[in-house]
Image (cartoon, helix red, strand yellow):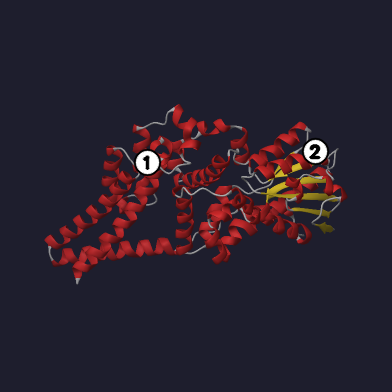
Amino acid sequence: MSSENELPASAGEMSASLAAQPIARITRDGVEYVLLGTAHVSRASVEAVREILERESFDAVAVELCDPRYKSMRDPESFRNLDLFQIIRQGKAGLVAANLALSAFQRRLAEQFGIEPGAEMKAAIDGAEARDLPIWLIDREVGVTLKRAIRSVGFMDRVGIMGGLAASLITREDVEESEIEKLKEGDMLGSMFNEFAKESPPLFEALIAERDRYMTARLREESTDSLRADKPVRRVLAVIGAGHLAGIEKALEAQQDDPGPMQKALSELPPGSPWPKRIGLALFVVIAVAIAILFYRGTDSGTEALWTWALCTGIGSAIGTLAAGGHPLSTLAALVVGPLKPFRPGVPVGAAAAGVEVWIHRPRVADFDSLRDDVIHWTGWWKNRISRTLMVFVFANFGMILGEWIAGFRIVKSLL
């Protein structure tokens, strides 16, 4: 096994774009891996990918993409297959909204410099297809990464993740192209949550380190499978975000475990912290006991407490729906369903409000066509029917939670 960070002797003839790219060459188990570090929104990275494919021969090309992102890149119309009812029913609206925010962050940077998002990955894929080379998709799904990140950290870090997503949509400051090149020192996900990732080892582990190990395991697995084929792979070009280069290089040198079980373990969702549910249950128990005591003291006091609960949770859910631009009937649904929490365990108020919203404002073909462009700017989230429905789901739930705490405070205070 060997490792080096230099190009062949002919590097002096290379263009500045390629010579400036971070590159590592690792040989293990009879396969040479050429790791090309890129910035995900960079002209220089696109040129470097094209040049290295022209200058050197490879048996396969690996890219930092998962299957859904690859399909989305190759088929921009894939959003037309989005089933909003199914997403809402499965409680995945928040996750889809987070994916859109990540995509919007990258597209906004790309729009500023007039370059297609993920153009360096597309250049690698196009180059591989032109040379009839296998394409290996080695990254873990973004949804799994975000879920593992959220479940691995505490409440404040979760707030940081949500804040990072929101800030990426609201900020309109232009970014210097030299700053874009500095993304080679990091990762697109990591750059959005940079400060939180630095201060939170669990967050860095989920966003960066785990993916380093996962992508390394994928490279090893694909290489092993190819050695059993009629045309074994001996040289692989891996186009990855440069923030992963050092981690993957190190993992290729040290990783010995079976890659299959490693990928499975890194794709499993850890159990969520029981504390949010316990705190929520404890709060509801306290409120229920308080209402019972107030009824014991007098019917008027108990009735007033019930009204406090109904108004706070209902109005909170309704305000959240209105803030998301929901239809009046969606707002009414949130107002009615919000107070019924004890009778709808596991069914968030956001699902009811969003269900009504998508029933009234069914997405049009134009909404699917413009979704990627609309969400680049934060105002577009209210304009597009699809993104607005996702926001109704998220905002109604936030409003309900806020209303629940306000109701609990007022009801318990009335006991004193």
Check the image and report above or below for 377 versus 307. above
Tell me the residue that label 1 is attached to. 354
Q: How many labels does the image show?
A: 2
* Residue 70 relative to residue 299: left or right: right
Q: Quadrant of residue 149?
A: bottom right
Check the image and report above or below for 247 versus 140. below
Q: Position of residue 327 (x, y in %)?
A: 30, 37
Residue at (58%, 65%) from the top-left corner?
A: 201
Residue 348, can we see it?
Answer: no
* Residue 230 relative to residue 204: left or right: right
Of the 4 image quadrants, the one containing the C terminus is bottom left
Tell me the residue that label 2 is attached to. 54
Residue in front for this viewpoint, 169 or 386: 169
Residue 7, can we see it?
Answer: yes
Residue at (39%, 48%) from the top-left corner?
A: 394
* Residue 396 relative to residue 57: left or right: left
Residue at (75%, 47%) from the top-left corner?
A: 16
Q: Position of residue 288 (x, y in %)?
A: 26, 62
Q: Position of residue 184 (x, y in %)?
A: 65, 53
| Dot placed on the residue nearer the N-terminal end, 2 or 1 | 2
